[in-house]
Amino acid sequence: MHSLTESGEPELSVYYRHLAALLQRSDEENFRALLDQARRVSRGEYETGLYDHQQAFRLLWRHLERSGYLRRAHREARAGLASGHAAPAERADLELFLTVYGQVHPPAAASA
């Protein structure tokens, strides 16, 4: 269930907070915000409601995808996990990101 405004619309305060900060933050900062939203949604830990956090996640994802940052982050996340040097919390974030990235961008089937 999500929080509603007085007019009965879903509350989007998290979304609007990220929208306002989007262009002032670096891609790295927006990526960290994306990971935070992914954690919140996957754990059910919402400031307002699921819908608000999902919309914030989509906003950040689309912005980072358009800038090309997600492709680079994907390569770096795979390398970071393969190195074995990631701390447990970072490893969990990277695994979550790679799972979502893999669902949005499934590997192309090998051609015959």
Image: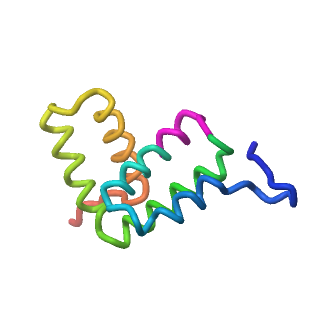
Which residue shows up at 23% across the image and 66% down it? 111
In the image, is residue 40 part of the stretch drawn in magenta?
Answer: yes
Position of residue 6 relative to residue 89, above or below, is below
Quarter of the picture containing the C terminus is bottom left
For this view, does 26 lie left or right of residue 7?
left
Which of 40 and 28 lies nearest the eye of the viewer?
Answer: 28
For this view, does 40 lie left or right of residue 66?
right
Which residue shows up at 43% across the image and 50% down it? 33
Pinpoint residue 11: horizontal percent, then vertical percent: 72, 54
Q: Which residues are magenta?
A: 38-46
Which of 36 and 58 lies nearest the eye of the viewer?
Answer: 36
Which of 72 and 22 lies nearest the eye of the viewer?
Answer: 22
Pinpoint residue 22: horizontal percent, then vertical percent: 45, 64
Which residue shows up at 60% across the image and 35% down it? 44
Quarter-wise, where is residue 66 in the image? bottom left
* Magenta portion: prevailing SS class: helix
Pinpoint residue 60: horizontal percent, then vertical percent: 46, 60
